[in-house]
Structure formats: structure tokens, C-alpha cells
Image (cartoon, rainbow, N blue to C red):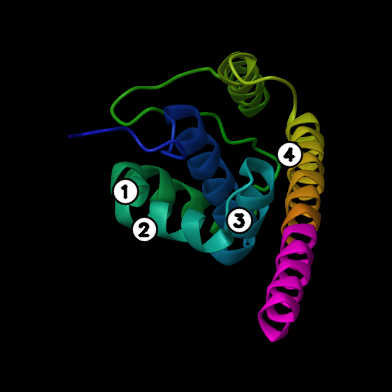
Amino acid sequence: MNATRQDAWTKDEDIILAETVLRHISEGRTQLEAFKEVGKELSRTSAACGFRWNASIRKQYQDAIENAKEERKQGNRKKAWKYIEPGKESDRDPIDTAILLLEKMRTDNSNVSGSPHTKQANLLEQLKSENESLKLKLKNYQEAWSEMGNLWEWVNEKNKN
């Protein structure tokens, strides 16, 4: 069965990763910094971002990487990186890409009630409710155990007489 992972990378996330790494290269900053930045933005670990970049994305952007390195050498740090789909040029601004990603996230999360904070609050309430239920069950078991102890003592008393 080829089920899509819930946390699978989307095309928009790949674009954000690529744009951020290319921007860091052109600015003379490290890819590790880019992975940390993208990780925070996408709620992923920097290691996951680095793995995705090196395993899947980097190969598609070899020309863009070379261009970013050239730009860094020329000191042209003012140019904003635009999304360039492998094999195509696009005028999509990184902000437009981010907006598209946010809209997609909102659409994807509309099936699940609320924001991450709401989800955490709901989970917390669910856990509190479960905790109360377990406390009640434990109390009932303790009372039953106590009653069994009393019954045991009563049986022993009857057997002595």
C-alpha cells in the first residue's frame, strides 16, 4: 500500500526550502543556517530540511546554485531570489510562494478543527478528561480492593468460630 505520509513534503515546501537555501548561498551564509530557518518556518527539524535538500531538491537546482555562487562572488546581494521551477522560469515572488503555502496550510487544516494552538488545547482537555476518568477508575478499584479485604477478614472470622 502506497499511503502518503501525513508529513510528506509538498511542492510549496520544497520551493520554500530551495529559495531559502539559494538565498543563503548568494548572501554567503551557510546552508545549515538555511535549514534552521526553513525548519522553524515549516515546523520541521533542520536535519529533515537538510536531508530533503541533499536527497531530493539539490539535484534539480544545480544551475541556480551556480548562479547563486556567482552572485555571491560579484557581491550582488540585493537581488531577491525568485522561484525557478526546474526547466522553467517564473516570476513568482518568494512572498507569493509563502502566501500560497499558508493558504494551502489553511485549506489542509480546515478539515482538522482549529490552529495548532487550538489542537494542543483540545488535546490538553482530552488528556485532562482521560486523567479524571482514570482517577475515578483507580478510586473504584481501591474501594473494591478494600471491600475484598473486609470480606476476606469477615470470612476468616467466620472460619475461626
Q: Secondary structure at mark 2?
A: helix
Amino acid carrying label 3: it is Ala
Instruction: From this view, report whether residue 29 is shown above or below residue 126.
Output: below
Residue 115 versus residue 76: which sits nearer the camera? 115
Magenta region: which residues?
A: 142-161
Quadrant including the N terminus: top left
Q: Which mark is residue 96?
A: none
Give the residue at mark 1.
56
Q: For mark 4, does the 10 Å Cα neighbourhood hold few (<14), some (14 to 19), or many (20 or more) residues?
A: few
Q: Nearer the viewer, residue 125 or 7?
A: 125
- Could you tell me which residue is drawn at 50 percent across and 54 percent down? 49
Q: Nearer the viewer, mark 3 or mark 4?
A: 4
> What is the residue that sits farthest to the bottom in this orientation?
160
- Is there any visible trace of residue 12 in the rendered image? yes
Distance in Å between CA atoms under marks 1 and 3: 16 Å
Residue 154 in the image, given as x and y percentages of width and height: 75, 72
| Whole-number angstrom distance, CA of label 3 to CA of label 2 | 13 Å
23 vs 52, left or right, is right
Which of the two labelled residues, at mark 4 and mark 2, occupies the earlier sequence position?
2
